Image (tube, rainbow, N blue to C red):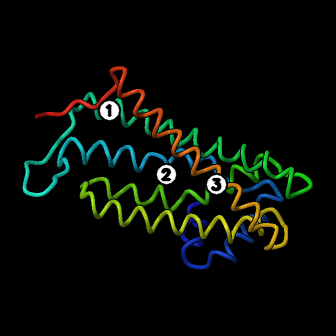
Amino acid sequence: MFGHVIGLFSSPESEWKKIRAKLENGTCQYTMLVFLLALLPPVSGFIGTTQFGWQIGTAEPVKLTVSSALTISVGYYFAIVLGIFVMGYVIKWMGQTYVKSVRLSEAVALAAFVSVPLLLVGIFMLYPILWVNFLVGLMALSYSVFLLYSGLPIVMDIPKEKGFLYATAILGFGMVALVGMLVVTVLLWGVGFEPSFTR
């Protein structure tokens, strides 16, 4: 399972082919990968925001209370897991336009493996430095997009040209979903679920 993670960074094209072969014979284990790697950002964020806090300029570090950080971390974990499975369903649904048939297992596996870089950089939240987190997050997002465009044609067994259109449609949906999640977060903060700070 974690061998695929290493392979996606060292030789992505050949690793996607291995993943496809395992998906075809039903031996690809990706759900445990989702549940385990999804722990990295919330746990790191919990530790970072309660123990170290983040600092803007020369001001004192801003920390969250333990109860507030715990609530946010639990919600964050479930949002990540749900988001991956929803993206899998969307990939399957959109596949009707580009592929004859897409199995849900293939679609969710694709969503899971594409999200790996974004989940791994969650470790940087242990010590939240805003500009470092932003730059590392941007690099991870770029690599996830690369994995989507390179892996989708292989996993779905379609030509690269068709895969490009399919991946672009998925990326567009993902961006809209991200904006939607930000709106929901702002609305939740407005009705009493805002973070509590120690100072």
Marks 1 and 3, how far apart at CA: 31 Å
Frontmost of labels 3 and 2 is: 3
> Which residue is nearer to you in this view: 147 or 180?
180
Question: Which residue is situated farthest in the top direction here?
Answer: 191
Name which residue lies at 86% across and 50% down. 96
Classify residue 81 as left or right of residue 67. right
Secondary structure, mark 1, is helix
Frontmost of labels 2 and 1 is: 1
Earlier sequence position, callout 2 versus callout 1: 2
Marks 2 and 1, how far apart at CA: 18 Å
Name which residue lies at 71% across and 62% down. 167
Classify residue 89 as left or right of residue 72. right
Circles 2 and 1, Cβ within 8 Å, touching? The answer is no
Name which residue lies at 32% across and 46% down. 45
The tag on residue 44 is none
In the displayed structure, would residue 19 be above or below residue 45?
Answer: below
The tag on residue 37 is 2
In the displayed structure, would residue 76 be above or below residue 162?
Answer: above
Pointer 1: what residue? 70
Marks 3 and 2, how far apart at CA: 24 Å
**Label 3 is placed on what type of residue?**
Gly
**Label 2 is placed on what type of residue?**
Leu
